[in-house]
Protein backbone atom coordinates (compact mmCIF):
# COMPACT_ATOMS: atom_id res chain seq x y z
CA UNK A 1 0.00 0.00 0.00
CA UNK A 2 1.39 3.38 -0.97
CA UNK A 3 1.64 6.21 1.52
CA UNK A 4 -0.96 8.92 1.09
CA UNK A 5 1.73 11.35 -0.09
CA UNK A 6 2.83 8.80 -2.71
CA UNK A 7 -0.77 8.54 -3.93
CA UNK A 8 -1.14 12.31 -4.18
CA UNK A 9 2.24 12.57 -5.91
CA UNK A 10 1.08 10.01 -8.46
CA UNK A 11 -1.84 12.28 -9.34
CA UNK A 12 0.41 15.36 -9.56
CA UNK A 13 3.09 13.61 -11.61
CA UNK A 14 0.51 12.45 -14.11
CA UNK A 15 -0.87 15.98 -14.32
CA UNK A 16 2.60 17.46 -14.94
CA UNK A 17 3.27 14.86 -17.65
CA UNK A 18 -0.10 15.44 -19.34
CA UNK A 19 0.64 19.17 -19.29
CA UNK A 20 3.91 18.62 -21.16
CA UNK A 21 6.28 18.86 -18.20
CA UNK A 22 8.56 16.32 -16.60
CA UNK A 23 6.66 14.29 -14.00
CA UNK A 24 9.51 14.67 -11.47
CA UNK A 25 8.16 18.14 -10.68
CA UNK A 26 5.08 16.54 -9.08
CA UNK A 27 6.71 16.14 -5.68
CA UNK A 28 4.27 16.71 -2.78
CA UNK A 29 4.93 17.71 0.82
CA UNK A 30 2.79 18.20 3.88
CA UNK A 31 2.03 21.90 4.16
CA UNK A 32 3.87 23.85 6.84
CA UNK A 33 0.90 26.23 6.82
CA UNK A 34 -2.06 24.00 7.75
CA UNK A 35 -4.19 27.15 8.00
CA UNK A 36 -3.81 27.54 4.22
CA UNK A 37 -3.79 23.96 2.97
CA UNK A 38 -3.02 20.34 3.87
CA UNK A 39 -0.54 19.48 1.10
CA UNK A 40 1.56 21.49 -1.29
CA UNK A 41 3.45 21.06 -4.55
CA UNK A 42 6.18 23.58 -5.43
CA UNK A 43 7.29 21.87 -8.64
CA UNK A 44 6.12 24.68 -10.88
CA UNK A 45 8.72 27.02 -9.39
CA UNK A 46 11.51 24.57 -10.18
CA UNK A 47 10.14 23.87 -13.66
CA UNK A 48 9.97 27.55 -14.62
CA UNK A 49 13.68 27.87 -15.39
CA UNK A 50 13.78 24.72 -17.51
CA UNK A 51 10.68 25.56 -19.56
CA UNK A 52 11.21 29.35 -19.69
CA UNK A 53 7.71 29.93 -18.44
CA UNK A 54 6.23 31.75 -15.47
CA UNK A 55 5.71 29.32 -12.58
CA UNK A 56 2.07 30.33 -12.02
CA UNK A 57 1.34 29.54 -15.69
CA UNK A 58 2.83 26.05 -15.27
CA UNK A 59 0.86 25.62 -12.03
CA UNK A 60 -2.35 26.70 -13.81
CA UNK A 61 -1.75 24.06 -16.49
CA UNK A 62 -1.42 21.39 -13.81
CA UNK A 63 -4.40 22.74 -11.88
CA UNK A 64 -6.61 22.25 -14.94
CA UNK A 65 -5.77 18.53 -14.87
CA UNK A 66 -6.48 17.91 -11.17
CA UNK A 67 -9.19 20.36 -10.10
CA UNK A 68 -11.95 17.80 -10.72
CA UNK A 69 -10.10 14.88 -9.17
CA UNK A 70 -12.19 13.17 -6.48
CA UNK A 71 -9.17 13.02 -4.14
CA UNK A 72 -9.35 16.76 -3.51
CA UNK A 73 -11.90 18.99 -1.86
CA UNK A 74 -9.91 22.08 -2.83
CA UNK A 75 -6.96 22.80 -5.14
CA UNK A 76 -5.70 26.27 -5.93
CA UNK A 77 -2.67 28.08 -7.28
CA UNK A 78 -1.08 30.74 -5.14
CA UNK A 79 1.47 33.03 -6.72
CA UNK A 80 4.24 32.79 -7.60
CA UNK A 81 3.31 29.16 -8.40
CA UNK A 82 2.42 27.07 -5.34
CA UNK A 83 -0.20 24.37 -5.82
CA UNK A 84 -2.18 24.03 -2.57
CA UNK A 85 -4.40 21.02 -1.93
CA UNK A 86 -6.92 19.78 0.61
CA UNK A 87 -8.10 16.18 0.53
CA UNK A 88 -11.75 15.29 0.15
CA UNK A 89 -13.38 13.72 3.20
CA UNK A 90 -14.54 10.67 1.25
CA UNK A 91 -11.10 9.97 -0.22
CA UNK A 92 -9.43 10.37 3.19
CA UNK A 93 -11.94 8.05 4.89
CA UNK A 94 -11.53 5.41 2.20
CA UNK A 95 -7.75 5.60 2.53
CA UNK A 96 -8.01 5.04 6.30
CA UNK A 97 -10.30 2.04 5.76
CA UNK A 98 -7.64 0.53 3.51
CA UNK A 99 -5.03 1.24 6.18
CA UNK A 100 -7.13 -0.40 8.87
CA UNK A 101 -7.57 -3.56 6.80
CA UNK A 102 -4.00 -3.82 5.52
CA UNK A 103 -1.25 -5.89 7.09
CA UNK A 104 0.94 -3.60 9.25
CA UNK A 105 -1.41 -0.74 8.24
CA UNK A 106 0.05 -1.00 4.74
CA UNK A 107 3.55 0.06 5.82
CA UNK A 108 6.32 -0.46 3.28
CA UNK A 109 8.24 -3.74 3.33
CA UNK A 110 11.66 -2.11 3.27
CA UNK A 111 13.58 -5.13 4.50
CA UNK A 112 12.09 -7.91 2.38
CA UNK A 113 13.71 -10.49 4.64
CA UNK A 114 17.22 -9.02 4.53
CA UNK A 115 19.31 -9.80 7.61
CA UNK A 116 20.67 -7.16 9.97
CA UNK A 117 22.78 -7.85 13.05
CA UNK A 118 22.43 -5.17 15.70
CA UNK A 119 25.04 -4.95 18.46
CA UNK A 120 23.68 -3.30 21.59
CA UNK A 121 23.85 -3.74 25.33
CA UNK A 122 27.54 -4.49 25.88
CA UNK A 123 27.49 -5.24 29.63
CA UNK A 124 30.45 -6.79 31.40
CA UNK A 125 29.91 -10.06 33.23
CA UNK A 126 30.23 -10.11 37.02
CA UNK A 127 29.15 -6.47 37.12
CA UNK A 128 25.67 -5.02 37.69
CA UNK A 129 23.71 -3.22 35.00
CA UNK A 130 23.86 0.47 35.82
CA UNK A 131 22.28 3.56 34.36
CA UNK A 132 25.01 3.80 31.72
CA UNK A 133 23.59 0.63 30.15
CA UNK A 134 20.15 2.19 29.73
CA UNK A 135 20.62 4.03 26.44
CA UNK A 136 22.23 1.27 24.35
CA UNK A 137 19.67 -1.25 25.64
CA UNK A 138 16.49 0.69 24.91
CA UNK A 139 17.70 2.49 21.77
CA UNK A 140 19.00 -0.77 20.31
CA UNK A 141 15.83 -2.64 21.23
CA UNK A 142 13.63 0.00 19.61
CA UNK A 143 15.69 0.12 16.42
CA UNK A 144 15.49 -3.67 16.25
CA UNK A 145 11.70 -3.60 16.62
CA UNK A 146 11.25 -0.80 14.09
CA UNK A 147 13.33 -2.55 11.45
CA UNK A 148 11.69 -5.92 12.14
CA UNK A 149 8.29 -4.27 11.67
CA UNK A 150 9.56 -2.97 8.31
CA UNK A 151 10.43 -6.46 7.11
CA UNK A 152 14.03 -7.05 8.15
CA UNK A 153 15.28 -10.25 9.75
CA UNK A 154 16.77 -8.77 12.90
CA UNK A 155 19.41 -10.47 15.07
CA UNK A 156 20.21 -8.66 18.30
CA UNK A 157 23.53 -9.46 19.99
CA UNK A 158 24.24 -8.41 23.59
CA UNK A 159 28.03 -8.66 22.96
CA UNK A 160 29.14 -9.41 26.52
CA UNK A 161 32.42 -8.22 27.95
CA UNK A 162 33.43 -11.66 29.19
CA UNK A 163 37.13 -12.03 28.37
CA UNK A 164 40.49 -10.55 29.20
CA UNK A 165 42.30 -9.34 32.30
CA UNK A 166 39.12 -8.57 34.26
CA UNK A 167 38.28 -12.28 34.25
CA UNK A 168 41.79 -13.16 35.38
CA UNK A 169 41.41 -10.80 38.34
CA UNK A 170 38.09 -12.38 39.32
CA UNK A 171 39.37 -15.95 38.96
CA UNK A 172 42.50 -15.32 41.01
CA UNK A 173 40.58 -13.51 43.73
CA UNK A 174 37.98 -16.28 43.98
CA UNK A 175 40.72 -18.91 44.10
CA UNK A 176 42.19 -17.20 47.17
CA UNK A 177 38.86 -16.71 48.91
CA UNK A 178 37.60 -20.23 48.21
CA UNK A 179 40.43 -22.83 48.40
CA UNK A 180 38.11 -25.56 47.08
CA UNK A 181 36.91 -23.42 44.16
CA UNK A 182 38.17 -25.83 41.53
CA UNK A 183 36.63 -28.89 43.19
CA UNK A 184 33.10 -27.51 43.67
CA UNK A 185 30.41 -28.70 41.27
CA UNK A 186 28.62 -25.35 41.42
CA UNK A 187 29.63 -21.88 42.57
CA UNK A 188 26.37 -21.50 44.44
CA UNK A 189 27.33 -24.24 46.90
CA UNK A 190 30.26 -22.03 47.91
CA UNK A 191 27.99 -19.06 48.39
CA UNK A 192 29.17 -17.36 45.20
CA UNK A 193 26.34 -15.41 43.63
CA UNK A 194 26.05 -12.29 41.49
CA UNK A 195 26.16 -9.98 44.53
CA UNK A 196 29.50 -11.41 45.59
CA UNK A 197 30.86 -11.32 42.04
CA UNK A 198 29.97 -7.64 41.83
CA UNK A 199 32.20 -6.93 44.82
CA UNK A 200 35.09 -9.14 43.70
CA UNK A 201 36.16 -7.27 40.57
CA UNK A 202 36.57 -3.71 41.99
CA UNK A 203 38.35 -5.10 45.06
CA UNK A 204 40.65 -7.28 42.94
CA UNK A 205 41.34 -4.44 40.51
CA UNK A 206 42.31 -2.06 43.31
CA UNK A 207 44.48 -4.72 44.92
CA UNK A 208 46.33 -5.50 41.68
CA UNK A 209 47.39 -1.85 41.40
CA UNK A 210 49.02 -2.04 44.82
CA UNK A 211 50.35 -5.61 44.77
CA UNK A 212 52.46 -6.52 41.70
CA UNK A 213 52.60 -10.16 42.81
CA UNK A 214 48.80 -10.46 42.80
CA UNK A 215 48.64 -8.68 39.46
CA UNK A 216 51.09 -11.19 38.00
CA UNK A 217 48.95 -14.08 39.26
CA UNK A 218 45.90 -12.49 37.67
CA UNK A 219 47.74 -12.13 34.36
CA UNK A 220 48.69 -15.79 34.56
CA UNK A 221 45.08 -16.75 35.29
CA UNK A 222 44.04 -14.71 32.24
CA UNK A 223 46.63 -16.49 30.11
CA UNK A 224 45.42 -19.92 31.26
CA UNK A 225 41.80 -18.96 30.67
CA UNK A 226 42.50 -17.76 27.14
CA UNK A 227 44.23 -21.07 26.46
CA UNK A 228 41.05 -22.70 27.81
CA UNK A 229 43.05 -24.56 30.44
CA UNK A 230 41.16 -26.44 33.10
CA UNK A 231 39.91 -25.88 35.73
CA UNK A 232 40.03 -22.14 34.95
CA UNK A 233 37.86 -22.48 31.87
CA UNK A 234 35.15 -24.47 33.66
CA UNK A 235 34.97 -21.99 36.55
CA UNK A 236 34.80 -19.13 34.03
CA UNK A 237 31.79 -20.78 32.35
CA UNK A 238 30.05 -21.02 35.73
CA UNK A 239 30.69 -17.31 36.34
CA UNK A 240 29.23 -16.53 32.93
CA UNK A 241 26.15 -18.62 33.71
CA UNK A 242 25.48 -16.76 36.97
CA UNK A 243 26.03 -13.36 35.34
CA UNK A 244 23.88 -14.06 32.29
CA UNK A 245 21.04 -15.27 34.50
CA UNK A 246 21.15 -11.98 36.40
CA UNK A 247 21.54 -9.86 33.27
CA UNK A 248 18.64 -11.64 31.59
CA UNK A 249 16.40 -10.84 34.55
CA UNK A 250 17.36 -7.18 34.58
CA UNK A 251 16.98 -6.78 30.83
CA UNK A 252 13.58 -8.44 31.11
CA UNK A 253 12.50 -5.67 33.50
CA UNK A 254 13.31 -3.26 30.65
CA UNK A 255 11.49 -5.50 28.14
CA UNK A 256 14.77 -5.85 26.26
CA UNK A 257 15.81 -9.17 24.74
CA UNK A 258 18.59 -10.54 22.56
CA UNK A 259 18.68 -13.28 19.95
CA UNK A 260 22.38 -13.85 20.66
CA UNK A 261 24.16 -13.88 24.01
CA UNK A 262 27.61 -13.90 22.46
CA UNK A 263 30.60 -12.26 24.06
CA UNK A 264 34.15 -11.27 23.29
CA UNK A 265 35.14 -14.87 24.10
CA UNK A 266 33.18 -16.18 21.10
CA UNK A 267 35.43 -14.24 18.74
CA UNK A 268 38.76 -15.48 20.13
CA UNK A 269 39.17 -18.48 17.82
CA UNK A 270 38.74 -16.20 14.81
CA UNK A 271 41.54 -13.84 15.81
CA UNK A 272 44.75 -15.77 14.91
CA UNK A 273 43.70 -16.63 11.33
CA UNK A 274 42.33 -13.11 10.85
CA UNK A 275 45.64 -11.57 11.98
CA UNK A 276 47.57 -13.86 9.64
CA UNK A 277 45.27 -12.88 6.80
CA UNK A 278 45.89 -9.18 7.46
CA UNK A 279 49.63 -9.86 7.28
CA UNK A 280 49.35 -11.99 4.13
CA UNK A 281 47.43 -9.24 2.34
CA UNK A 282 50.12 -6.71 3.25
CA UNK A 283 47.69 -4.62 5.24
CA UNK A 284 49.14 -5.16 8.72
CA UNK A 285 52.67 -4.04 9.50
CA UNK A 286 54.85 -3.52 12.57
CA UNK A 287 55.09 -0.05 14.09
CA UNK A 288 57.13 0.28 17.30
CA UNK A 289 56.63 -3.43 17.84
CA UNK A 290 52.84 -3.28 17.47
CA UNK A 291 50.85 -4.62 14.52
CA UNK A 292 48.75 -1.91 12.85
CA UNK A 293 46.67 -1.26 9.72
CA UNK A 294 46.58 2.15 8.03
CA UNK A 295 43.02 3.36 7.53
CA UNK A 296 43.42 7.05 6.65
CA UNK A 297 41.93 8.26 3.38
CA UNK A 298 42.76 11.24 1.16
CA UNK A 299 39.37 12.83 1.81
CA UNK A 300 39.80 12.82 5.61
CA UNK A 301 39.58 16.28 7.14
CA UNK A 302 41.00 15.12 10.46
CA UNK A 303 43.73 12.69 11.45
CA UNK A 304 42.62 9.04 11.52
CA UNK A 305 45.29 7.00 13.35
CA UNK A 306 46.17 3.46 12.24
CA UNK A 307 44.02 0.66 13.65
CA UNK A 308 46.00 -1.14 16.36
CA UNK A 309 45.55 -4.91 15.95
CA UNK A 310 48.16 -6.46 18.28
CA UNK A 311 50.10 -4.64 21.01
CA UNK A 312 53.87 -4.91 21.25
CA UNK A 313 53.50 -7.40 24.11
CA UNK A 314 51.31 -9.63 21.92
CA UNK A 315 48.02 -8.69 23.58
CA UNK A 316 44.85 -8.23 21.57
CA UNK A 317 42.66 -5.14 21.81
CA UNK A 318 38.99 -4.19 21.44
CA UNK A 319 39.58 -3.52 17.74
CA UNK A 320 40.96 -7.05 17.31
CA UNK A 321 37.93 -8.57 18.99
CA UNK A 322 35.48 -6.36 17.07
CA UNK A 323 37.07 -7.33 13.75
CA UNK A 324 37.04 -11.01 14.67
CA UNK A 325 33.38 -10.67 15.67
CA UNK A 326 32.66 -9.30 12.18
CA UNK A 327 34.41 -12.35 10.72
CA UNK A 328 32.12 -14.57 12.80
CA UNK A 329 28.96 -12.63 11.91
CA UNK A 330 29.78 -12.71 8.21
CA UNK A 331 30.36 -16.46 8.27
CA UNK A 332 27.25 -17.22 10.33
CA UNK A 333 24.66 -14.77 8.99
CA UNK A 334 25.94 -12.91 5.87
CA UNK A 335 24.13 -9.76 7.04
CA UNK A 336 23.30 -6.89 4.70
CA UNK A 337 24.04 -4.53 7.58
CA UNK A 338 25.64 -4.53 11.02
CA UNK A 339 24.53 -1.77 13.40
CA UNK A 340 26.44 -0.77 16.53
CA UNK A 341 24.54 1.16 19.22
CA UNK A 342 27.32 2.56 21.38
CA UNK A 343 28.54 5.72 23.09
CA UNK A 344 29.22 8.40 20.46
CA UNK A 345 32.68 8.90 21.98
CA UNK A 346 33.64 5.58 20.38
CA UNK A 347 33.17 6.92 16.86
CA UNK A 348 36.90 6.98 16.06
CA UNK A 349 37.30 3.38 17.20
CA UNK A 350 34.52 2.18 14.94
CA UNK A 351 35.75 4.28 12.01
CA UNK A 352 39.06 2.40 12.28
CA UNK A 353 37.33 -0.98 12.64
CA UNK A 354 34.92 -0.41 9.74
CA UNK A 355 37.68 0.74 7.38
CA UNK A 356 39.93 -2.17 8.31
CA UNK A 357 37.05 -4.62 7.79
CA UNK A 358 36.35 -3.23 4.31
CA UNK A 359 40.03 -3.06 3.29
CA UNK A 360 40.63 -6.62 4.43
CA UNK A 361 37.50 -8.01 2.84
CA UNK A 362 36.22 -9.21 6.21
CA UNK A 363 32.82 -8.00 5.02
CA UNK A 364 31.80 -7.38 1.39
CA UNK A 365 31.75 -3.83 0.04
CA UNK A 366 27.96 -4.08 -0.11
CA UNK A 367 27.63 -4.68 3.64
CA UNK A 368 26.64 -1.56 5.56
CA UNK A 369 28.53 -1.01 8.79
CA UNK A 370 26.57 1.55 10.76
CA UNK A 371 27.59 3.47 13.88
CA UNK A 372 24.66 4.75 15.95
CA UNK A 373 26.38 6.84 18.61
CA UNK A 374 24.33 7.98 21.55
CA UNK A 375 24.89 11.01 23.74
CA UNK A 376 25.22 11.35 27.50
CA UNK A 377 22.34 11.09 29.92
CA UNK A 378 22.78 14.03 32.28
CA UNK A 379 21.21 15.03 35.57
CA UNK A 380 19.36 18.30 36.16
CA UNK A 381 22.74 19.92 36.85
CA UNK A 382 23.81 19.20 33.29
CA UNK A 383 26.46 16.71 34.41
CA UNK A 384 26.43 12.91 33.83
CA UNK A 385 23.61 11.41 35.87
CA UNK A 386 24.68 10.24 39.35
CA UNK A 387 23.02 9.08 42.54
CA UNK A 388 22.67 11.56 45.40
CA UNK A 389 25.91 10.31 46.94
CA UNK A 390 27.73 10.74 43.63
CA UNK A 391 27.73 7.07 42.63
CA UNK A 392 26.48 5.31 39.51
CA UNK A 393 22.87 4.20 39.93
CA UNK A 394 22.01 0.57 39.28
CA UNK A 395 19.35 0.04 36.64
CA UNK A 396 17.10 -2.01 38.89
CA UNK A 397 17.12 0.82 41.47
CA UNK A 398 16.20 3.35 38.77
CA UNK A 399 13.30 1.17 37.66
CA UNK A 400 12.25 0.57 41.27
CA UNK A 401 12.37 4.26 42.22
CA UNK A 402 10.39 5.25 39.14
CA UNK A 403 7.80 2.55 39.77
CA UNK A 404 7.37 3.75 43.34
CA UNK A 405 6.99 7.33 42.15
CA UNK A 406 4.19 6.32 39.78
CA UNK A 407 2.57 4.17 42.47
CA UNK A 408 2.44 7.14 44.83
CA UNK A 409 0.56 9.10 42.17
CA UNK A 410 -2.08 6.38 42.18
CA UNK A 411 -2.85 6.96 45.86
CA UNK A 412 -6.60 7.19 46.28
CA UNK A 413 -7.33 5.31 43.04
CA UNK A 414 -9.82 2.56 43.87
CA UNK A 415 -8.10 -0.32 42.07
CA UNK A 416 -7.08 -3.69 43.52
CA UNK A 417 -3.55 -3.59 44.93
CA UNK A 418 -2.17 -6.05 42.37
CA UNK A 419 -3.57 -4.00 39.51
CA UNK A 420 -2.13 -0.78 40.96
CA UNK A 421 1.29 -2.41 41.10
CA UNK A 422 0.94 -3.58 37.50
CA UNK A 423 -0.14 -0.11 36.37
CA UNK A 424 2.78 1.50 38.19
CA UNK A 425 5.23 -0.94 36.59
CA UNK A 426 3.95 -0.35 33.05
CA UNK A 427 3.71 3.43 33.39
CA UNK A 428 7.18 3.62 34.96
CA UNK A 429 8.72 1.73 32.04
CA UNK A 430 6.91 4.03 29.62
CA UNK A 431 8.23 7.06 31.52
CA UNK A 432 11.83 5.84 31.44
CA UNK A 433 11.87 4.61 27.85
CA UNK A 434 9.90 7.43 26.27
CA UNK A 435 11.87 9.98 28.29
CA UNK A 436 15.05 8.68 26.65
CA UNK A 437 13.80 7.70 23.19
CA UNK A 438 11.97 10.98 22.56
CA UNK A 439 15.40 12.60 22.28
CA UNK A 440 17.54 12.21 19.19
CA UNK A 441 19.95 9.42 20.11
CA UNK A 442 23.14 11.32 19.26
CA UNK A 443 22.32 14.25 21.54
CA UNK A 444 22.98 14.62 25.25
CA UNK A 445 19.82 15.10 27.27
CA UNK A 446 18.58 15.83 30.79
CA UNK A 447 17.24 12.76 32.57
CA UNK A 448 14.42 14.34 34.60
CA UNK A 449 12.38 11.51 36.04
CA UNK A 450 9.90 13.91 37.65
CA UNK A 451 9.03 15.38 34.26
CA UNK A 452 9.06 11.96 32.55
CA UNK A 453 6.42 10.72 35.03
CA UNK A 454 3.97 13.55 34.30
CA UNK A 455 0.63 12.54 32.78
CA UNK A 456 0.55 15.67 30.63
CA UNK A 457 2.96 16.94 27.99
CA UNK A 458 5.30 14.99 25.75
CA UNK A 459 5.75 11.97 28.03
CA UNK A 460 5.20 8.23 27.97
CA UNK A 461 2.43 8.38 30.62
CA UNK A 462 0.57 10.93 28.46
CA UNK A 463 0.59 8.51 25.51
CA UNK A 464 -0.66 5.71 27.77
CA UNK A 465 -3.34 7.95 29.29
CA UNK A 466 -4.61 8.73 25.79
CA UNK A 467 -4.81 5.02 24.99
CA UNK A 468 -6.60 4.25 28.25
CA UNK A 469 -9.10 7.02 27.51
CA UNK A 470 -9.86 5.44 24.11
CA UNK A 471 -10.13 1.97 25.66
CA UNK A 472 -12.58 3.34 28.25
CA UNK A 473 -14.83 4.68 25.49
CA UNK A 474 -14.69 1.38 23.63
CA UNK A 475 -15.39 -0.55 26.82
CA UNK A 476 -18.58 1.47 27.38
CA UNK A 477 -19.63 0.62 23.82
CA UNK A 478 -18.83 -3.07 24.21
CA UNK A 479 -16.00 -2.84 21.67
CA UNK A 480 -12.96 -3.12 23.95
CA UNK A 481 -12.22 -6.67 22.79
CA UNK A 482 -12.88 -6.01 19.10
CA UNK A 483 -10.19 -3.48 18.24
CA UNK A 484 -8.42 -5.87 15.86
CA UNK A 485 -11.56 -6.59 13.86
CA UNK A 486 -12.18 -5.07 10.43
CA UNK A 487 -15.39 -3.76 8.93
CA UNK A 488 -15.86 -0.62 11.02
CA UNK A 489 -17.14 2.07 8.65
CA UNK A 490 -15.08 5.28 8.59
CA UNK A 491 -16.97 8.46 7.71
CA UNK A 492 -15.88 11.57 5.88
CA UNK A 493 -14.82 14.03 8.55
CA UNK A 494 -17.58 16.36 9.73
CA UNK A 495 -15.34 18.71 11.72
CA UNK A 496 -11.85 20.17 11.68
CA UNK A 497 -10.78 18.15 14.72
CA UNK A 498 -11.99 14.91 13.15
CA UNK A 499 -10.15 15.58 9.92
CA UNK A 500 -6.99 16.63 11.77
CA UNK A 501 -6.93 13.25 13.54
CA UNK A 502 -7.54 11.42 10.26
CA UNK A 503 -4.67 13.27 8.60
CA UNK A 504 -2.33 12.45 11.49
CA UNK A 505 -3.09 8.74 11.12
CA UNK A 506 -2.24 8.80 7.41
CA UNK A 507 1.28 10.02 8.27
CA UNK A 508 2.13 6.62 9.81
CA UNK A 509 3.67 5.20 6.62
CA UNK A 510 6.12 8.00 5.91
CA UNK A 511 7.04 8.24 9.58
CA UNK A 512 7.91 4.53 9.67
CA UNK A 513 10.09 4.81 6.58
CA UNK A 514 12.03 7.70 8.13
CA UNK A 515 12.37 6.03 11.54
CA UNK A 516 13.59 2.82 9.92
CA UNK A 517 16.02 4.33 7.44
CA UNK A 518 17.45 6.83 9.93
CA UNK A 519 17.51 4.49 12.97
CA UNK A 520 15.43 7.11 14.73
CA UNK A 521 13.03 6.01 17.50
CA UNK A 522 12.53 9.67 18.39
CA UNK A 523 10.48 10.04 15.20
CA UNK A 524 8.09 7.36 16.47
CA UNK A 525 7.80 9.25 19.79
CA UNK A 526 7.04 12.54 18.07
CA UNK A 527 4.42 10.89 15.88
CA UNK A 528 2.69 9.24 18.85
CA UNK A 529 2.63 12.58 20.65
CA UNK A 530 1.06 14.33 17.65
CA UNK A 531 -1.54 11.57 17.23
CA UNK A 532 -2.36 11.74 20.95
CA UNK A 533 -2.79 15.51 20.77
CA UNK A 534 -5.01 15.20 17.71
CA UNK A 535 -7.15 12.54 19.40
CA UNK A 536 -7.56 14.54 22.61
CA UNK A 537 -8.60 17.60 20.62
CA UNK A 538 -11.12 15.46 18.72
CA UNK A 539 -12.36 13.99 22.02
CA UNK A 540 -12.92 17.41 23.58
CA UNK A 541 -14.79 18.75 20.52
CA UNK A 542 -17.05 15.75 19.95
CA UNK A 543 -19.31 13.85 22.37
CA UNK A 544 -18.62 10.37 21.06
CA UNK A 545 -20.76 8.36 23.48
CA UNK A 546 -23.78 10.70 23.37
CA UNK A 547 -23.79 11.24 19.59
CA UNK A 548 -27.40 10.65 18.50
CA UNK A 549 -26.67 10.14 14.80
CA UNK A 550 -25.84 6.42 14.77
CA UNK A 551 -23.95 6.53 11.47
CA UNK A 552 -21.87 9.43 12.73
CA UNK A 553 -21.22 7.61 16.03
CA UNK A 554 -20.05 4.47 14.24
CA UNK A 555 -17.68 6.61 12.18
CA UNK A 556 -16.28 8.10 15.36
CA UNK A 557 -15.76 4.64 16.82
CA UNK A 558 -14.05 3.40 13.66
CA UNK A 559 -11.69 6.38 13.83
CA UNK A 560 -10.75 5.94 17.49
CA UNK A 561 -10.29 2.18 17.06
CA UNK A 562 -7.74 2.82 14.33
CA UNK A 563 -6.15 5.51 16.51
CA UNK A 564 -5.82 3.05 19.38
CA UNK A 565 -4.33 0.35 17.14
CA UNK A 566 -1.71 2.70 15.74
CA UNK A 567 -0.80 4.03 19.18
CA UNK A 568 -0.54 0.45 20.44
CA UNK A 569 1.74 -0.46 17.54
CA UNK A 570 3.84 2.61 18.25
CA UNK A 571 4.48 1.85 21.91
CA UNK A 572 5.33 -1.75 21.00
CA UNK A 573 8.02 -0.37 18.70
CA UNK A 574 9.35 1.70 21.60
CA UNK A 575 9.27 -1.30 23.92
CA UNK A 576 6.54 -0.71 26.49
CA UNK A 577 2.95 -1.72 27.13
CA UNK A 578 -0.31 -0.05 28.13
CA UNK A 579 -2.42 -0.96 31.18
CA UNK A 580 -6.16 -1.47 30.78
CA UNK A 581 -6.90 1.57 32.94
CA UNK A 582 -5.10 4.29 34.86
Image (cartoon, grey):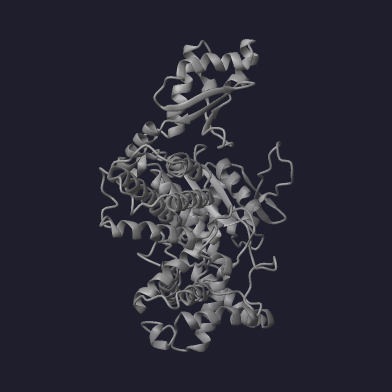
Q: Nearer the viewer, residue 398 or 177?
A: 398
> Where residue 201 appears, x then y in whole percent?
56, 78
Residue 573 shows in the view: yes
Q: Is residue 339 left or right of residue 184?
A: right
| 463 left or right, relative to 286 | left
Residue that lies at the very extreme toward the front in this rendered image: 548
The picture places residue 378, in percent across and down from the top left corner, at: 65, 65
Residue 388 location (% of width, % of height): 64, 78
Q: Is residue 159 visible?
A: no
Residue depicted at x 33% and y 37%: 98
Q: Quadrant of residue 502?
A: top left
Position in image of residue 171 (x %, y %): 51, 78
The relative height of residue 277 versus residue 85 in the rendered view (above or below) is below
Please give the count of numbered marks on the rendered protein: 0
The answer to which image quadrant residue 60 occupies is: top right
Which residue is more in the foreground, 58 or 430? 58
- Given residues 459 and 298, the one toward you in this image is 459
Q: Is residue 239 above or below residue 339?
A: below
Residue in the image at 67% along x and 83% along y: 211
- Name the image quarter holding the N terminus: top left
Q: Is residue 57 above or below residue 273?
A: above
State the quadrant of the C terminus: bottom left
Amino acid sequence: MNSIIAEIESILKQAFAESGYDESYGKVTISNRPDLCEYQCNGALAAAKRYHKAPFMIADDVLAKIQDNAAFSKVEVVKPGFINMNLSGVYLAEYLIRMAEADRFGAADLGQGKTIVIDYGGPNVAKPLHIGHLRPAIIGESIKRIKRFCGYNMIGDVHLGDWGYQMGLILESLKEQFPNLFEAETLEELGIDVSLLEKVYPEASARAKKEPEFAEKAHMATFKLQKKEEPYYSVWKKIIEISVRDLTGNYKKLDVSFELWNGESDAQDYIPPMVEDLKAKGLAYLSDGALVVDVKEETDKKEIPPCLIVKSDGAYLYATTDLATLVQREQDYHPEQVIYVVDKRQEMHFTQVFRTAKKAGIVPDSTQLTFVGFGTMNGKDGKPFKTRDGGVMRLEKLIGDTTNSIYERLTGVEFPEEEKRDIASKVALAAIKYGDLSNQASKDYIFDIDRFCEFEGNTGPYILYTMVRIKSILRKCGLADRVEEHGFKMNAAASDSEKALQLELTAFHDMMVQACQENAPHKVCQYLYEVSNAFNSFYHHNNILKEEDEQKKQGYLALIILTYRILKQGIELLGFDCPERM
